[in-house]
Amino acid sequence: MTLVRDLPLYSAAQTRELDRRAIQGLPIAGYALMCRAAVAAWDELRWRRPNPRRIDVVCGPGNNGGDGYVLARLAQADGVEVRVWSLGQPQAGTEAAQALGDWSAVGTTQVYERGCLREATIVVDAIYGTGLSRAPSGLAAEAIEEIRALSGQAFVLAIDLPSGLSADTGQPLGTAVKADLSVSFIGRKLGLYTGAGPELCGEKVFCDLGVPQDEGVEPAATLLDESSLAIRLPKRARTAHKGSSGFVTLAGGDEGYTGAILMATRSALRAGAGMVTVASRGAHAAVLAAAQPEAMFRPTESADDFVARIDKTKVVAIGPGLGQGDWGRALWRAALRSDKPLVVDADALNLLAADPQSCDRRAAPWILTPHPGEAARLLGCTVAEIEADRVAAVREVAHRYGGTVVLKGAGTLVCGQQLAVCPYGNPGMAVGGMGDALTGIIAAFVAQGLAPEPAAQTGVMVHALAGDVAAKAGERGLLPSDLIECLRQIVNPKPEAN
């Protein structure tokens, strides 16, 4: 299932290849592209900071610095006082050298020194672009740290991406600029949308500079786009009934863990599942039925009970409140033996991590939904190693365990046949129970007929968008129940007018 509205994301190397093809094949001169980039960045800066009195531009020795020199010339031509700080001379004969030469004809450049930005109110970060592959050092590291220290005092524009941020992993290469606005070019960089990327980039603006995105360069990932929801979740037929809307079975809720399975139940119903059955401890049935009367709660004390519960279901979601005791293990083993698609979360993931070979017993598709801690257990590494390269981590989980993998966190990743990144969501969603809600949502979409990978992508996007709606009342104190109450407006998208 390919959705044309999802946008391509590229690695640093792929972006450079797009740039090379534009110069050699269209052809667009390299310096012309540099000038286009500077015009786009300057326009975006003026839109947000009209009539600036002065700007400080910090330029590295490469093409990113060249963009800065062109922007400085444009700003000065518009009557703005410009101070340009150099971190090294461009190589002779390069576009950056040409940009410096054109700037030098109208303005002066000073060598960067510590403290020179002390009184800055608008700073343009043109130090490093996508070519950086190691931690900044020397004067460059000092400049990056000084710009970081200006957060809240000065408005920081990053050209292409914040200096020091990896365009591939979304993690700082040692230290990185924290920008208020990042204007990127040629191709959207994967690292701007996951890990620390969203936090360090601030507002993101993309300009393709007239370079086509379909020049034979396969993107590293796709960026999920809210506008695709009308295609993913079309309006139901007038003849729809509860059976055609899908039958979900949720397994979990060991003694003392009713909340997790209840969150998953409510979210599955609000995401549109026609019928939801909960296989949980018999002692919980009365409480759960009173809390969510629209669901069917079936006392499930053994693997045999569980097998009987899933006979007619379309999908099984297992894990919320499952526990890792004898009861949870029995249900998990029964789920592994079933021929039903699975959505696997929480303690089911921990049981899988304890017995990785159990994935070999699965013939039916599954969706794994780990947070970084669970992913670390699945891969036998540390959480820090997962977060250091989230893209590599989600791909490795998918490689080892198969199926579709959702790596939750800032810029949630979905890895199946392709890699997709969700740009939505907010820090208010960092609270217990949010993952249980996501499990129910994804299961509901599998039940409604979406294949596992599109169901995971759609579920992640719907979950994040509902969280953003709920966060309008404030991020701190946001609860999963707040998110669940916002699901209906997200899962009933209005098709765009032609």
Image (cartoon, rainbow, N blue to C red):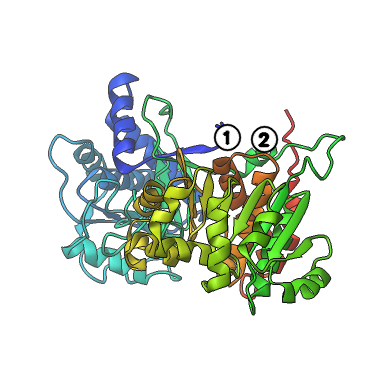
Q: Nearer the viewer, mark 2 or mark 1?
A: 2
Quadrant of the rendered image containing residue 35: top left
For image coordinates 34% across by 31% down, the residue present is: 18
Disc 2, SS: helix
Question: Looking at the picture, how far across and down is residue 380, in whole percent?
Answer: 33, 63
Question: Looking at the picture, how far across and down is residue 454, in whole percent?
Answer: 58, 41
Disc 1, SS: loop
For image coordinates 34% across by 42% down, the residue present is: 11
| Image-based side of 235 in relation to 370, left or right | right
User: What residue did someone put label 2 on?
Assistant: 231
Above or below, 405 relative to 479: above
Quadrant of the rendered image containing residue 378: bottom left
Amino acid type of the residue that numbered disc 1 sits on in the rendered structure: Arg
Q: Are marks 2 and 1 in contact (CB under 8 Å)?
A: yes
Q: Which mark, residue 5?
A: 1
- Tell me the CA gap for discs 2 and 1: 9 Å
Instruction: Answer whether residue 423 is visible to the viewer in this image.
Output: no
Q: Residue furthest front?
A: 304
Q: Which mark, residue 437?
A: none
Above or below, 246 relative to 268: above
Work out whether mark 2 precedes mark 1 in sequence or the reverse, and give the earlier one. Answer: 1
In this view, the residue in front, 179 or 119, is: 179
Question: How packed is label 1: few (under 14 Cα within 10 Å), some, or many (20 or more)?
Answer: some
Amino acid type of the residue that numbered disc 2 sits on in the rendered structure: Ile
